[in-house]
Amino acid sequence: MPISLLCAKLAMDSAAEGIVIVDLSQKIQPIIYVNKGFVDITGYSAEEVIGKNCRFLQGKDTEKSSINAIRTAIDARKQYTGEVINYRKDGSMFYKCITVLIIEDDIVMRGIIASTLKKTYTVFQANDAENWDNSLYKLCTTCRFS
């Protein structure tokens, strides 16, 4: 493995943020790589998720509009940054700020990288909803790539 690829792999493997690579050339768009950050955030091992579509992280409170925005960006081959509600292996809900990047070479589109912030937040009670919205906005504006 060339040194630059080795360095990139070591950086992804050790990043605190969850990183997922998905193969978009296959119909079900299976996960082909997750790093330790993803394992720590979700509670799923790499072996449990490789080959699955990311949909298994969704649940009853996952907003369809968020999922549709991600799909639209992928179809348009555009970068997307936004927030989404997902669920850990233990069933607990978490909010994440996600950035989806399309990676292509000269021949085919290889996949996407979805980066989730390591920081997860306790779900606020209903009376704290306004504070939560403000905190989530601040969080997602800090994770955007320029």
Image (cartoon, helix red, strand yellow):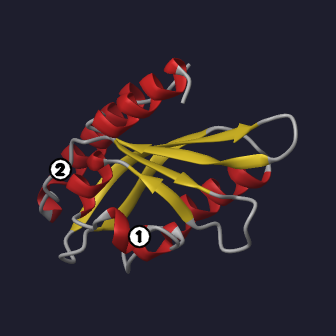
Identify the secondary structure beneath mark 1: helix
Q: Position of residue 17 (x, y in %)?
A: 31, 39
Q: Look at the image and tell me in which quarter the N terminus lies.
A: top right
Q: Residue at x 41, y 29 (%)?
A: 141
Which residue is more in the foreground, 7 or 43?
7
Which residue is more in the foreground, 108 or 75?
108
Describe residue 120's horizontal placement relative to residue 52 as left or right. Answer: left
Describe residue 70's horizontal placement relative to residue 89 as left or right. Answer: right
Q: Which mark is residue 134?
A: none
Kind of residue indicated by mark 1 = Val
Q: Residue at x 21, y 65 (%)?
A: 43
Vertical placement of residue 8 versus 36, above or below: above
Residue 57 visible: no
Residue 116 visible: yes
Question: How many angstroms separate mark 2 from mark 1 (CA)?
Answer: 23 Å
- Residue picked out by circle 1: 49
Q: Look at the image and tell me in which quarter the C terminus lies.
A: top right
Q: Position of residue 32 (x, y in %)?
A: 53, 59
